[in-house]
Image (cartoon, grey):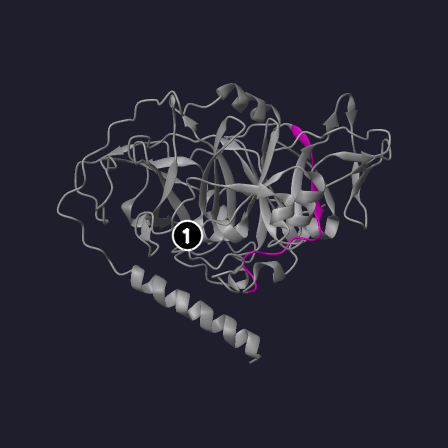
Amino acid sequence: MPRKRWTQLAALLIIVAIILLACVPIAPDEAPAPAAAPAETDSAASADTGGSDETAQQSSGDTGVPQLNTEVIVDDSPPPVRTRGFSTDFTRRTVSWGEILSGGPPKDGIPAVDAPEFESIAAGDEWLEALEPVIAFSHGDVTRAYPLSILIWHEIVNDVVDGQPVTITFCPLCNASIAFDRNFDGQVLDFGTTGRLRNSDLIMYDRQTETWWQQFTGEGIIGTYAGEQLRFLTSQVLSWEDYKASHPDGEVLARPDMPRNYGYNPYVGYDSTSSPFLFLDTPDPRLQPVERVLGLTTETDAIAYPFTLLEEAGVVHDTFGGSDLAIFHKPGLASALDSSRISKGRDIGAVAVYDRQLGDQLLTFSANENGTFSDEETGSTWDILGMAVDGPLAGEQLTAVLHFDHFWFAWAAFFPATELYEEG
């Protein structure tokens, strides 16, 4: 076996050993902790909620998800999981206790970034390489990049972007990068990690009520807000090169002053595994478990587009949720979950989804060899961020559609009725 493969296998075995130890059944504590009272709204921390509407207008279609767990189970019996350190109302839940597993670390053992600091593009260039993946988020006059080389170690960043409270999240085990509005029920929530997983996915908690939230779906699953839904915000996973080209005045999250190997991947080779960590069910056989898919949802439906198909096509046109869509794929984005150094990960490409309707024109797109896109109607040239950079429509912006870039096994687990797009 090649030496590189032995190295990857050894790293995987170490992680598996740690996780298996964490899966040993845990006896319940003497009694569940008392429920926390809902926090009062802090006027000084309240959001500029008018800005939230602006963000919503940047996305077309329905930004909900299929509601799978809306029935709240009320049970006064002590939960059969460790609850020490939580003031969650464990009498309220929407999921079975058997679905909740310990991921190993305790509550906040993977520390969220609660006081993020940002630096310039020039400063980011000193440690970020061209193809490294970042989550780009814009609101108002501010655009920020959150490198996965940081989020892979912290999973959550609580931030305020030009008045908009936002939580940027990344679950490495499901390859799930999602942005949420922190405005909820008249207050601004901030989030931490519970150390628990469901379908291999991060379970977050809010520090105001200590409700447990499913990162993948934004659903409250245990606690005061069980059965409630966080609002998704549109974000984009891009290469550092594409981000700085499109946002030369943008900001980038600075590396926290913590002892972490930023830039390195602790899950070497994970995006080629056939056995996702702590996934108890049988993966949907329609695709390989960790094949990347682009997912779209409404409140009733879900559909997944395999990256392999998008890469081959360059552009896919489809209709979903009542909108005519163009799905772009651009080569030149490193996987964060492949090689030991993230910048050297294999090229998976960046994806984006836009409404084809621009004013009174329904545009039809094709991919160019240089990573741009052209529309047949005017011959204008577009970039991966949906901006016309040349031609009659130069300066026009397509309407972004909320989408998700995830591993197939997790997408199918949370949305088992999902459609799988097949060309032709």
Return the x and y of residue 367 as percentages of the image width and height.
Answer: 78, 45
The quarter of the rendered structure image containing the N terminus is bottom right
- Foreground: 381 or 412? 381
Instruction: Work out whether residue 294 can be spotted.
Output: no
How many numbered marks have been drawn onto this rendered protein structure? 1
Task: Say which residue appears at 56% left-offset and 79% top-offset.
Answer: 3
Nearer-the-camera pick, 415 or 378: 378
> What residue is pinned by disc 1?
200
Asked whether residue 220 appears in the rendered view, the answer is: yes
Is 264 drawn above or below residue 399 in the view shown?
below
Question: Would residue 76 appear left or right of 71 to someone viewing this image?
Answer: left
Position of 335 with respect to 411 (left or right) is right
Find the residue positioned furthest to the left. Answer: 30
Q: Is residue 332 magenta?
A: yes
Residue range of the region highlighted in magenta in the rendering: 323-339
> Which of the 4 image quarters holds residue 218?
top left
- Locate residue 91, reporting x and y percent: 22, 35
What residue is rendered at 16% in x and 40% in y?
77
List x then y, in percent, for residue 197.
37, 50
* Residue at 33% across, 57% down: 104
Residue 33 within the magenta-colored segment of the rendering: no
Q: Position of residue 145 (x, y in %)?
A: 58, 42
